[in-house]
C-alpha cells in the first residue's frame, strides 16, 4: 500500500480518482476550503467517510502549496509519491490557466523536492497536441500551434515535469472528459457546456409557444415540442471528437499509478471517437432540436445566418458566443496514439464505453435532470 499525496481531490476527475486510489492506498488529499466549507468537509461531501484519507488544507498557487511548516515536517518520510491532478480548465482566462497550471505545478514540484519524494505523477491533457493531425505519447514539441491559454499552460507544465530532476515521473493525457459510463456525471462543462445554450434557447421557445406567443416563421415549436431552428454551428463534417468517460479515465490512471514511474506519457483517449457531426446531430436529437446547419467556414456561417429574423439572429448570437470557445475542438482533431498505455497495462487495459447516440442521450438526460449543475470544482 503506497502513501500518496493527491492534489485536486475535489475536482471532477480528482474525486473519481480518489475513490479508486483509496481502495488500495492511503491518500493525503490536499484541498482548499470553499466559503464556510472546510477542505475536509468538501472531500467528505464528495466521497463520504473514508478511513484511508487524511485531508490537508492548502492552495497550490501558494508557496509550499499553502502547507504549514508543521504539516511539511509531518509529511517528511510519510509520502511515497505525488499525484498532481489539480488544474484550471479555463480556455479564455490566460492568467487563471497559467497561475494554476504553471505556478501551481511549480509549487507542487517544490514540495516534492522539499519532502524528497522521488515519484511524481502529473495529469496533463491530450490537447498539448494543439493543431497537430497525429500525436504520439512520446510527442511534445512537434511544431504544433497551441490554440488557447489552457493548452499553452498544460504544454508548459509538461516541460516543467520533464525538466524536474527530483526523480521519475509519469504524465497522463486525457482527452475531453464526459460523464461516467453509466450516464451520470460529476461535472457539466466541456461537452455539456457546448449543448447547454442550445437547450436553453429551445426551452425558451417552448415556453413562448406554450404561452401562445407568436414566433417568426424561422422558429417553430411543433405539437410534440420538437423545436425547429435553422441555426449555424461552425464544425467539421469529417473530423472526429475524442470524448472519454471520466470514470474510465480515473480507473486507467489508478492502474497506471500502481506501476513504477518510468518517465513515460500515457494517452487516456477513446480508441474509436465518433465524427463531430454525429455527436452534434445525435445530441440535438436527444434535446429534441432539429434544423441546425453545420458550416465549416466563416463565409458559410454568414450565408447560413443572413436571412434570420431578428429574434432568430439574437438567439444565434446567444449560442455562438458560447460555442466559439469550442471551435478548435470541433473543427480539427488529432489522432492520438495509445501504444504505450496498451503495452504497459497489458490485459488490465480495457476500452471505454462506445460513444453512441444512446449514450449521449443518457448523458444529456442526466444533465437536464440536474439542471446543468454549474458548480465548479476544477481547481482543488
Image (cartoon, rainbow, N blue to C red):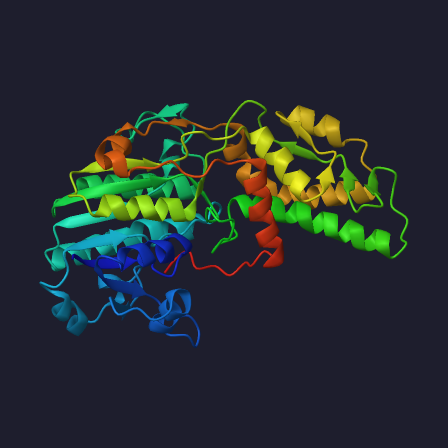
Q: Is residue 164 visible?
A: no
Residue 68 occupies quadrant:
bottom left
**Residue 306, how many percent across, how many down?**
78, 31
**Residue 319, how many percent across, how many down?**
66, 43
Which quadrant would the N terminus be assigned to in this image? Answer: bottom left
Q: Relative to residue 208, is residue 29 depicted above or below?
A: below
Q: Is residue 365 visible?
A: yes
Total marks placed: 0
Q: Relative to residue 155, is residue 31 depicted above or below?
A: below
Q: On the rendered structure, is 337 left or right of 227?
A: left
Which quadrant would the C terminus be assigned to in this image? Answer: bottom left
Return the residue nearer the eye: 255 or 275: 255
Q: Residue furthest bottom?
A: 36
**Residue 251, how many percent across, how many down?**
33, 47
- Residue name at image x 17 percent, y 42 percent: 261
Q: Relative to residue 333, is residue 227 depicted above or below?
A: below
Q: On the rendered structure, is 197 left or right of 379?
A: right
- Residue name at image x 69 percent, y 51 percent: 200
**Residue 96, how many percent across, how many down?**
41, 53
Q: Residue furthest front?
A: 347
- Residue name at image x 23 percent, y 68 percent: 67
Amino acid at each position: 500500500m503506497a502513501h500518496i499525496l493527491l492534489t485536486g481531490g475535489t475536482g471532477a476527475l480528482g474525486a473519481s480518482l480518489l475513490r479508486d486510489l483509496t481502495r488500495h492506498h492511503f491518500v493525503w488529499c490536499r484541498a482548499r476550503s470553499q466559503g464556510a466549507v472546510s477542505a475536509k468537509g468538501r472531500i467528505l461531501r464528495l466521497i463520504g467517510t473514508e478511513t484511508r484519507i487524511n485531508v490537508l488544507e492548502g492552495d497550490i498557487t501558494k508557496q509550499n502549496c499553502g502547507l504549514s511548516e508543521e504539516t511539511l515536517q509531518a509529511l517528511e518520510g510519510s509520502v511515497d509519491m505525488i499525484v498532481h491532478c489539480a488544474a484550471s480548465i479555463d480556455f479564455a482566462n490566460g492568467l487563471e490557466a497559467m497561475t494554476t497550471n504553471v505556478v501551481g505545478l511549480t509549487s507542487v514540484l517544490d514540495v516534492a523536492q522539499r519532502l524528497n519524494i522521488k515519484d511524481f505523477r502529473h495529469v496533463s491533457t491530450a490537447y498539448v497536441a494543439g493543431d497537430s493531425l497525429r500525436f504520439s505519447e512520446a510527442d511534445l514539441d512537434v511544431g504544433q500551434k497551441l490554440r488557447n491559454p489552457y493548452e499553452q499552460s498544460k504544454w508548459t507544465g509538461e516541460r516543467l515535469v520533464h525538466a524536474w530532476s527530483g526523480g521519475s515521473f509519469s504524465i497522463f493525457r486525457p482527452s475531453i472528459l464526459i460523464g461516467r459510463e453509466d450516464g451520470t456525471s460529476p461535472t457539466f462543462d466541456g461537452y455539456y457546456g457546448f449543448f447547454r445554450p442550445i437547450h436553453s434557447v429551445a426551452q425558451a421557445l417552448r415556453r413562448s409557444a406554450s404561452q401562445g406567443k407568436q414566433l417568426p416563421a424561422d422558429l417553430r415549436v411543433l405539437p410534440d415540442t420538437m423545436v425547429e431552428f435553422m441555426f449555424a454551428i461552425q464544425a467539421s463534417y469529417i473530423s472526429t471528437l475524442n470524448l472519454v468517460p471520466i470514470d474510465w479515465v480515473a480507473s486507467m490512471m489508478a492502474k497506471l499509478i500502481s506501476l513504477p514511474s518510468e518517465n513515460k506519457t500515457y494517452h487516456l483517449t477513446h480508441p474509436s471517437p465518433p465524427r463531430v457531426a454525429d455527436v452534434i446531430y445525435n445530441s440535438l436529437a436527444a434535446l429534441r432540436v432539429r434544423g441546425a446547419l453545420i458550416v465549416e467556414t466563416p463565409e458559410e456561417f454568414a450565408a447560413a445566418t443572413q436571412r434570420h429574423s431578428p429574434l432568430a439572429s439574437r438567439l444565434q448570437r446567444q449560442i455562438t458566443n458560447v460555442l466559439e470557445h469550442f471551435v478548435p475542438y470541433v473543427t480539427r482533431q488529432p489522432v492520438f496514439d495509445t501504444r504505450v498505455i496498451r503495452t504497459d497495462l497489458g490485459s488490465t487495459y480495457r476500452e471505454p464505453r462506445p460513444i453512441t447516440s444512446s449514450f449521449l442521450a443518457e448523458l444529456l438526460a442526466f444533465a437536464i435532470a440536474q439542471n446543468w449543475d454549474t458548480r465548479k470544482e476544477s481547481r482543488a
